[in-house]
Image (cartoon, rainbow, N blue to C red):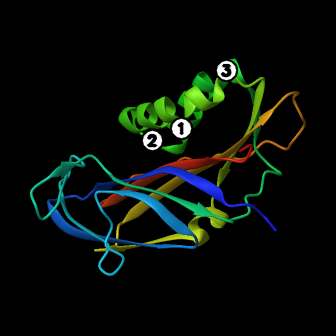
Amino acid sequence: MSKHLEQRKPAIYLYPAKTTEVTVKLKFKGTLTTTYPAYDAGSGWKVTAHPDGTLVDKSNKTYSYLFWEGLSKTHYDMSHGFVIKGKDTASFLEKTLSTIGLDSKQRNDFITFWLPQMQNNPYNLISFQSKAYTDSAVLKISPKPDSILRVFMAYKRLEQPISVPQQTIKPFVHKGFTVIEWGGTNLTE
């Protein structure tokens, strides 16, 4: 039986072309452990989203993004990816996340969350997941975004480098109402 993996720090950023009332529903194949602002299982998150990414809830509280974490038994494919020395993790993530399409704030948020867990490892096997992640954490957003980027990094600590085919990274094009999400999981734990 496979163990539960912690889906860490998925952060959902909303960038509508104009100020818009947005509902985000998450159908997660697992157990949510933390959400902020609080997630309503029936109605989801309901916020007013501004073009600069500022989110305002019904109580007039302001947020930079919607946050969740959870436990899941999702299987992630690590057959393609990158083997990176721990000490080179910051520069690898900066370059790769930029290529993928995260802006400087999103890259900074991602790196400052993950780097402390990775930089002292001898090596990291890093693979950016797509279908396995998006199938296990389905987002339903209304109104429907024009473009959505979901970056989910699975990694595990390695004592020695191994050989894996390099993953192909495709640049993302921001168009109209854009949604950006990033998160990850440590397969070593």
The reply to whether discs 2 and 1 touch (Cβ–Cβ < 8 Å) is yes
Determine whether the residue tagged by mark 2 lies in a helix, strand or loop. loop
Q: Nearer the viewer, residue 4 or 181?
A: 4
Which quadrant holds residue 178?
bottom left
Amino acid of disc 1: Leu
Q: Residues within 10 Å of mark 3 (few under 14, many from 20)?
A: some
Q: Residues within 10 Å of mark 1 (few under 14, many from 20)?
A: many
| Mark 2 vs mark 1, CA separation in Å | 6 Å
- Residue at position x 64%, y 23% in the image: 119
Q: Amino acid at mark 2?
A: Leu
Res 88 label: 3
Mark 1 or mark 3, whichever is nearer to me: 3
The residue pinned by badge 1 equals 97
Q: Is residue 172 in view?
A: no
Label 3 close to label 2 by CB (< 8 Å): no
Residue indicated by mark 2: 102
Residue at coordinates 50% horizontally, 56% vertically from top-left?
150
**x and y percentages locating residue 14 in the rendered image:** 30, 56
Disc 1 to disc 3, C-alpha distance: 14 Å
